[in-house]
């Protein structure tokens, strides 16, 4: 179940994507979005040349209907192992992430094991529902 070293690795449960692993140095020319437009978290790479100017702008407010929390992890430094589970806690994939790699948990359970001091940037939807509602833990 170890995944190959492709730059973008979709982890599926049947035909449903439950997680995506992104390896550092994904090629992009200008702007490349890596997630479908329907995802509540939009992951993109902006690879601009020196002198590029983006006009001043803001993003207007929209009301979104988000039914599950997606979580994004970026490994700033260190090494960590991920195990990805489906909603029945069946293991679907394992991956080792190193500096510059990142993962999007689309709709899955997961565990993380840190092999050394590791710094990870985590992004997920808010507002935070509180400790009691934020996570469901496997009984085993």
Image (cartoon, helix red, strand yellow):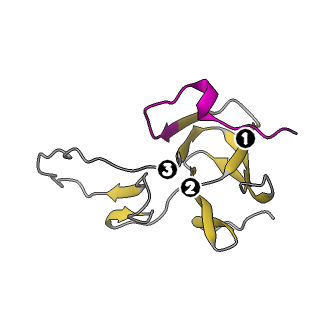
Q: Nearer the viewer, residue 33 or 5?
A: 33
Q: Nearer the viewer, residue 126 or 120?
A: 126
Q: Nearer the viewer, residue 120 or 133?
A: 133
Name the residue that disc number 2 marks: 106
Work out which quarter of the rendered image holds the N terminus and state it. bottom right
Name the residue that disc number 1 marks: 112
Q: Does dot 2 land on a helix, a strand or a loop?
A: loop
Residue segment shown in magenta: 122-139
Say if the magenta span includes residue 136. Answer: yes
* Left or right of residue 29, residue 75 in this image: right
Query: Given this view, does label 2 or label 3 mark the residue nearer the observer?
Result: 3
Circle 3 packing at 10 Å, graded few (<14), some (14-19), many (20+), is few
Above-or-below relation of 106 to 63: below
Q: Position of residue 117 (x, y in %)?
A: 69, 29
* Left or right of residue 38, residue 87 in this image: right
Q: How far apart are the two marked residues, 2 and 1, measured between alpha carbons?
A: 16 Å
Say if the magenta span includes residue 106. Answer: no
Name the residue that disc number 3 marks: 67
Circle 2 packing at 10 Å, graded few (<14), some (14-19), many (20+), is many
């Amino acid at each position: 179940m170890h995944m190959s070293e492709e730059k973008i690795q979709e982890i599926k449960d049947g035909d449903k994507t439950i997680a995506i692993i992104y390896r550092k140095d994904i090629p992009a020319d200008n702007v490349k979005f890596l997630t479908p437009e329907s995802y509540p978290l939009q992951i993109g790479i902006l690879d601009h040349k020196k002198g590029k100017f983006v006009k001043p702008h803001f993003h207007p407010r929209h009301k979104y209907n988000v039914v599950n929390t997606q979580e994004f992890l970026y490994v700033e430094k260190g090494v960590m192992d991920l195990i990805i589970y489906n909603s029945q806690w069946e293991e679907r994939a394992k991956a080792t992430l190193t500096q510059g790699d990142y993962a999007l948990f689309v709709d899955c359970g997961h565990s993380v094991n840190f092999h050394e001091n590791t710094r990870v940037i985590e992004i997920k939807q808010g507002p935070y529902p509180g400790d009691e509602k934020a996570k469901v833990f496997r009984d085993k």
